[in-house]
Amino acid sequence: MHDHAFQGNYMENDLASSASDFFPDAVVRHEAVGENEFRFFCENDVVLRVIVLENGLIRFRYCPDGLFEEEFSYAIDPEYVPASGVAVFSEEADFYEIKTELVAVRVEKKALRVEVLDEVGKPVCEDERGFHWETNNDYGGDIVKMSRRLQGGEAFFGLGDKSCELNLRGKRMQLWGSDTYGFGPKSDPLYKNIPFYLGLHNGTCYGTFFDNSFRSFFDFGNERSNVTSFWAQGGEMNYYYIHGPSADEVLQTYARLTGKPQLPPMWALGYHQCKWSYRTEEEFKGIASKFRELKIPCDAIYLDIDYMDGYRCFTWNRENFPDPPKMIRELKDDGFQRVVMIDPGIKIDRNYRVYVDGMEKDYFCRRGDGPHMKGSVWPGLCVFPDYTRDEVREWWGQLFKGLMQEDGVAGVWNDMNEPAVFEEGTFPRDVRFHYEGNRCSHRKAHNIFGMQMVRATNDGIKALGHGRPFTITRSGYAGVQRYASTWTGDNVASWEHLRIANTQCQRLASSGYSFAGSDIGGFIEQPDGELYVRWLAMGVFHPLCRTHSSGEHGSQEPWSFGEKFTRISRHWIEMRYRMLPYLYTTFWQHTQTGIPMLRSLFFLDQENVETYHRAEEFAVGDNILVCPVSKKKASGRWLYLPEGQWFNFWSDQLEEGRNEIWADAPLDRIPLFVRAGAVLPQGPVRQFVGDRPDAGLELHVYHIDGRHESELYEDAGDGEAYLHGEKSVKTFSVEGSESSIVVKQNTEGAFEPAYAEFTLIFHGMPFDAEKCTVDGEEVALEKVGFSRRATVERGFKEVELV
């Protein structure tokens, strides 16, 4: 929510190679350290450590002078425990080989170049020049570099929130979190700093995670068409090779390494409304009343910075919000959760308790020569907490007690945390950070600042016992998925940005960060009704579903575009609520496995090269495929279906995969397909997630000539009882033929939902069903439209339709 874009305040060497580069000499000796670490020593003191963490997870650490940095990473999950991996070492004439069940790592004796092969000996990843470095004469240390051969037909995905084409082949990108107001498809860098990408060729997927928080660069065949490379302006060449061979397996391993997200409160998956700004209590409550009056579902409404007293964090403007606890209590009684913004800048004001307390404790960042770091943001001149100190994070977390426990705020939105300041865009590079005892400058800490801020926010809320935390951050580093949801930043109300939002949310999911959404309708400028409802139709299938706008160009609530578009907006938001059982299940699966909630087509049909180049189609969970309409005045669109059989959600028309098809899409339709054999749970239309808890679910059963399994996860929707067994996981197995279909249910877990019945609705039956039996007893079968319907008790074991 800002109008101060920046690209960083210094431009260091951004070339993958230069005339002043140094390279390793020949290997002169090697040694094994334990069973799974191997060290290679070169004639010019370069050392490579190869650590086998798992059969498909190999860590590579290089050092030019043999003096490795102390082990520390914000990205690695503190609870990560390597899986069992067995490494076998051997020596050949020209190389050393480290072999596991999944890969073979070959280290060339002549120049320390590395090659990774799969279990059948096919090259997956090969060094070109391999590791090399350049002395950083300006700041000390080295610019560390890695170059690899670009494989034939290789495609690349990931790196966070990049706004370019989905496939990164031919692109050069950098990671340096930046406040990029009104960014476009060629803007770079953006807000997120996730140095993880997928490489995909010949049906095999691998991952590269470059765990280095300095400003870093990634080149996918841009400088040299047959070479891919990555490098950083300091620190260590420290990267992880993650073997698939499937994209799902790569993401599962990456999630184990960097951490899985927490299951959010269910209301966080409802519809959210936000604006810069709802400036008074009257306006804020009026928005809530309008939702209920028009019967448009909504779970959360947000307050941007104008709720504060002079933009001082943790305060209220008492003139415009005279009694926050009373206001929030009344909103809660009507089913609304309240989310407020908190920025990192603390106003310099001797009458401001947060500033005074932080100064007394010496918790704010300092410049290289000792004075406090001061920069201007919304309150004026500010100081900034050093979130890389544990005691500062704990102090910050306790500051939320008033907002959360006394006032009743439900969630927190961290913004401006790249960090952004108005003078130079971000902090000067000499600002010092504690970095958990590994003291450093802003050059190293910049990219992790936002992650550590939202970590402090999340952990503070959690410590207050406020139920499951809901936090949202604009900036983050690898591992930030453990702490917060995110959005794609200050976008524009345009058809181009609708397409960019689609790409960004898919890319974030491929980067291990699923809980993401965009500012529906665009933050900057004003959409018309058509653009808004097309964007909303896409946004209801994103994990975070939030309309947000700058407010400078008019209102952007669902009723802002006239009666026609109000009706269509209501339709789409109701669709979100009907899909909540499926979306909540998908989120739970993501927390268990790390497999993304949103899946680009290559996740579904990896051996099909066509999927490497499709950017708009995406899957949501196991069983839904979506393709937004992204052109003005379109009545439908062409899209590509991946391998398998897919039913049109609206018509029950069966379509074969690996085909491009046309789908009609008036404004109240989006091309939407359901996998054959799926059991798709849908809930009732409700005004918020706690509304109508005893209403039964519909189980939409789609025919298959074969067998398919689906899941339904349920718990209380908040709190931690689910961690102690108060949850339910239902597995539905569908077995179909030309003349029958059988649905079997298996339930695990102690949670008992409030509703008593399921309504089974059968789709796409190739036979005229005459009888339905439930656990051997015949039940009434009703025809509704294209489908058959039967109401059964929730605990059924087997339903057969013949």
Image (spheres, rainbow, N blue to C red):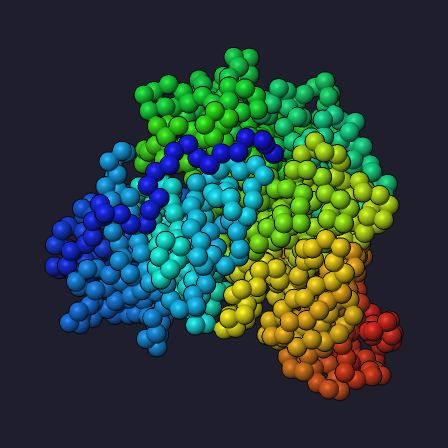
Q: Is residue 459 above or below residue 534?
A: above
Kindly indicate the quadrant of the structure image that contains residue 227.
bottom left
- Where residue 418 sits in the image (x, y, percent)? 48, 36
Q: Position of residue 717 (x, y in %)?
A: 67, 50
Identify which residue, 246 or 749, lies in the foreground. 246
Above or below 704: residue 624? above
- Residue shown at 51% from the left, 41% from the top: 191
Asked whether, in this view, residue 52 is left or right of residue 354, the answer is: left
- Judging depth in this view, the residue of 140 and 385 nearest the camera is 140
Residue 410, percent from left and from top = 65, 37
Q: Is residue 609 left or right of residue 276?
A: left
State whether residue 334 is above or below residue 797: above
Quarter of the image that includes the N terminus: top right
Q: Please indicate whether residue 44 sits to the left or right of residue 164 in the image.
A: left
**Residue for point 38% across, 23% down:** 366
Residue 737: horizontal and vertical position, in percent?
Answer: 70, 85
| Residue 60 visible (yes or no) | yes
Query: What residue lies at 43% left-to-right and 40% top-to-bottom?
Result: 176
Give residue 288's quadrant in the image: top right
Considering the image in quadrants, where does the C terminus appear? bottom right
